[in-house]
Image (cartoon, rainbow, N blue to C red):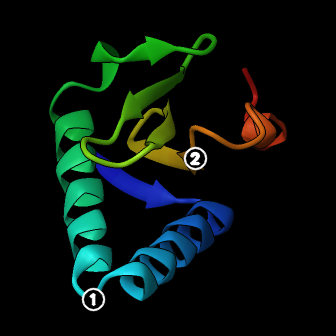
Amino acid sequence: MEIRLLEPAQHEMDDAFLYYEEQSPGLGYEFIDEIFATLKRIKLNPQSWAPFGKRTHRCLVHRFPYGIIYQIRENELLIVAIAHLHRKPEYWIERVDL
């Protein structure tokens, strides 16, 4: 199953990387490592995390206040958002068809 990020999700990941890297050199790379580890967990078991509708789920990222919002599609996992959990909740909802 392929993983595809929506463009806004890619921007969220890039922005978070830059923020963490500015806070402490190397921390941005640790963030990216955790994102990729989370994506790997999702790919191995896409149905395992909290549902937000028929095919939308959220998996929490270890060590960082982020969740990966994704949809299970026929041949892909669509990453809808790399969502900061302490900001406006469910801002990403318009990106999905629940």
Spot occupied by residue 60 in the image (x, y as percentages of width and height):
37, 33
- Is residue 94 or residue 26 the one in the foreground? 26
The residue lying toward the viewer, choosing from 73 and 24, is 24
Query: Compared with residue 42, is residue 63 higher up or lower down, i.e. above or below?
Result: below
* Residue 33's disc number: none
Q: Is residue 66 above or below residue 44?
A: below
Which circle, 1 or 2, is nearer the viewer?
Answer: 1
The residue that appears at 17% across and 51% down in the rendered structure is 37
Per the image, the residue denoted by label 1 is 25
Which element is circle 1 on? loop
The residue where tag 2 is placed is: 83
Few, some or many residues within 10 Å of mark 2 (<14, 14–19, 20+): many
Mark 1 → mark 2, Cα distance in angstroms: 22 Å
Q: Does residue 33 sit above or below 1 in this rendering? A: below
- Which residue in the rendered view is the most extreme toward the front? 23
In the displayed structure image, the side of residue 73 where residue 84 appears, left or right: right
**Residue 77 placement: quadrant:** top left
**Which residue occupies 50% across, 37% down?**
70
